[in-house]
Image (cartoon, rainbow, N blue to C red):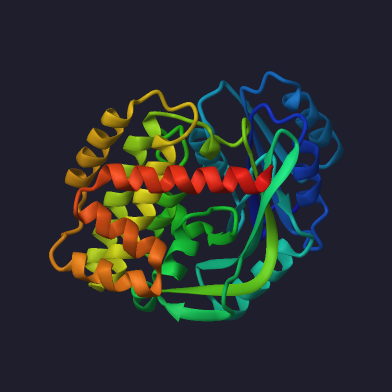
Amino acid sequence: MDLNPMVSVIMPVYNAKNYVKNAIESVLNQTFKNFEFIIVVDGATDGSAEICDQYAAQDNRIILIHQKNAGICKARNVGIHIAKGKYISFCDHDDFYFPDYLLKSVTKAETLNVPLVKFAYKSEYWKNEKLINVIEEEVPEICIPLSELSHDYPLLNLTVRALWNGLYLRDLIVGNNIYFNEEIFAGMEDFLFNIKLLKHISSIAYMSDVLFLHYGRFGQSTSLKYSERRLQDIITVQKEEAIWLAANKMHPKVVVQHRSKYLSLFIETLIHPDCPFSTKEKKRLLGDYKRSQQTSNDGTLLVSLSEIFRNPKVGVQDALFCLEMYGAILLLWRIKEYMNNSSKQ
């Protein structure tokens, strides 16, 4: 193994024996070879640990760590602490790097001398071994100062909501003492991590190349499982992003888009099949959530109404939220879920 690797790839592993081989091999088969591969086995009990042991014995680029189960955030932080690469990238234990992931992202970062490179990716959603949806996120081929990002909410959303579609300068993370919040266990940790990084970045490079395949598996993916803790995590992350946007003088349209994104995440948790709350309790929780908001409602109802003609989904939902019509919002989401399920049968 190179003592001065260009990249440290960090992969937490927990009970993914059916998928972890493909994930590991997608990293080992990169066309770019100057990297170390830090695998942190987070108390796996299903045979995943033994699979990792086998690969570590065969490839000296792998640094294998076994720890008691402490969650994905702790596992990633352990990886960051020992990483020696100039750059850090992340891969989940059931996802897939396309062969040029490292080559193209490192080339972009080095050529433009930027601390963060973000690129396009594809997501596949599976349920009961059946592919139910495919989404390919488009990303423009640009390099922009951070000041422009605060006024382009779709691009900001692509920047903060995922971790694995990026190459990060290690000094940016370690030098600013930015780590994953180990109190978050139900998703949203990548949002919070990226938002904190934005406070220390002057520019970001974006690539249109699709370099990563993300799998969302019901029953496997943390973000697709129900957790009551996720409701509080959404509030925590929303507040952090609102503070960043306010510091960058966000436009009222951005307020609406920002609020609608986190409201959607909140409602998706409330309508999850495993959510035990009654409709009355869900309305109460939506009211509590609205009162927790850091963004002002002043003037944004009119913006919401105008957004109906440009982006009906965002405009209608946010207008109903401003008017505290929580029952109507829940009804619209139930109709949407019913239509989605009917189309997949």
Vertical side of 127 occupied by 316: above or below: below
Identify which residue is drawn at 72% across, 20% down.
46
Q: Is residue 17 left or right of residue 195?
A: right
Q: Residue 133 in the image: x percent, y percent?
A: 66, 51
Residue 177 in view of the camera: no
Where is residue 37 shown, x and y percent of the image? 70, 46
- Give the farthest residue toward the left: 298
Percent position of residue 78, x then y: 53, 37
Q: Residue at x 59, y 37 (%)?
A: 221
Most extreme residue toward the top is 45
- Rendering coords of residue 65 (x, y %): 65, 31
Number of dots carrying numbers: 0
The residue sitting at 52% across, 54% down in the picture is 162
Image side of residue 117 versus residue 318, left or right? right
Q: Is residue 182 left or right of residue 57?
A: left
Does 191 sit above or below residue 319?
Answer: above
User: Eyeballing the image, is 134 above or below 56?
Assistant: below
* Quadrant of the rendering where the C terminus is positioned: top right
Q: Quadrant of residue 172?
A: bottom left
- Rendered residue at 76%/22% (across/down): 47
Q: Nearer the viewer, residue 61 or 289?
A: 289
Asked whether the viewer can see residue 245, the reply is yes
Q: Choose between 290 and 304: the one closer to the eye.
A: 304
